[in-house]
Image (cartoon, helix red, strand yellow):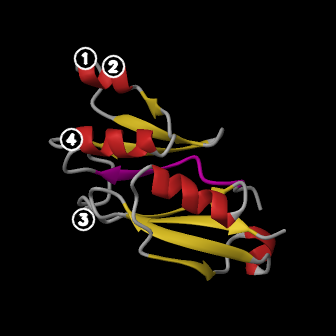
Amino acid sequence: MPTAGIDHIAMPTANAERLIAFYKRLGFAINNEEAWRAGTVSAFSIQVGEYSKINVHPEGYTASLRGPTAVPGCTDICFVWDGPVATCQHMLQEAGVEVIQGPVQRAGGRGRGTTPSLSLYARDPDGNLLEWMTYQV
């Protein structure tokens, strides 16, 4: 299959400052934050690992190429945690993020859904559902 992965997804936010602070507490880097603050770019992104990002559409962002019903809170993201589930739980607790469910067994993308994994669920300030999946192999 020529499609190799996901480069980025996009999500709108109702409060860009609150979203930036939240994701920084979780250890994510914010791309183009300074340029966005200076008004030289209209959006910023959250870096996820080496090869993926989440493009954030701040309040008032307009673009013709976006989902027609995209509103804050419409996104459901699953991150892969590289380590034990207990370490992920500790990181979320230290960041002040409430785990709303988990750890629970889930089928992820590895091994076409056959690689054992545990997931933790939380929400970001816009209400987006966030999942941290920890593979058990």
The disc, 1 or 3, on the residue closer to the chain's N-terminal end is 1
| Residue 124 on image: x %, y % | 35, 58
The residue depicted at 31 percent of the width and 66 percent of the height is 74
Work out how far the residue at label 4 is from the one at label 1, CA to CA, in angstroms: 15 Å
Q: Nearer the viewer, residue 50 or 116?
A: 116
In the visual, does 7 lie left or right of 19? right
Mark 4: which amino acid?
Tyr
Check whether the beta carbons of the residues at disc 4 and disc 1 lie within 8 A of each other: no
Q: Which three-letter amino acid code belongs to the residue tagged 1?
A: Ala
Corner quadrant of residue 99:
bottom left
Q: Quadrant of the N terminus?
A: bottom right
* Residue underneath mark 2: 35
Mark 3: secondary structure:
loop
Query: For the residues marked 4 and 2, what is the alpha-carbon distance in whole angstroms?
Result: 15 Å
Residue denoted by label 1: 38
| Residue for badge 3 | 69
**Which quadrant of the figure has residue 113?**
bottom right
The relative height of residue 54 versus residue 92 in the rendered view (above or below) is above
Q: Which dot marks residue 61?
A: 4
Magenta residues span: 4-12
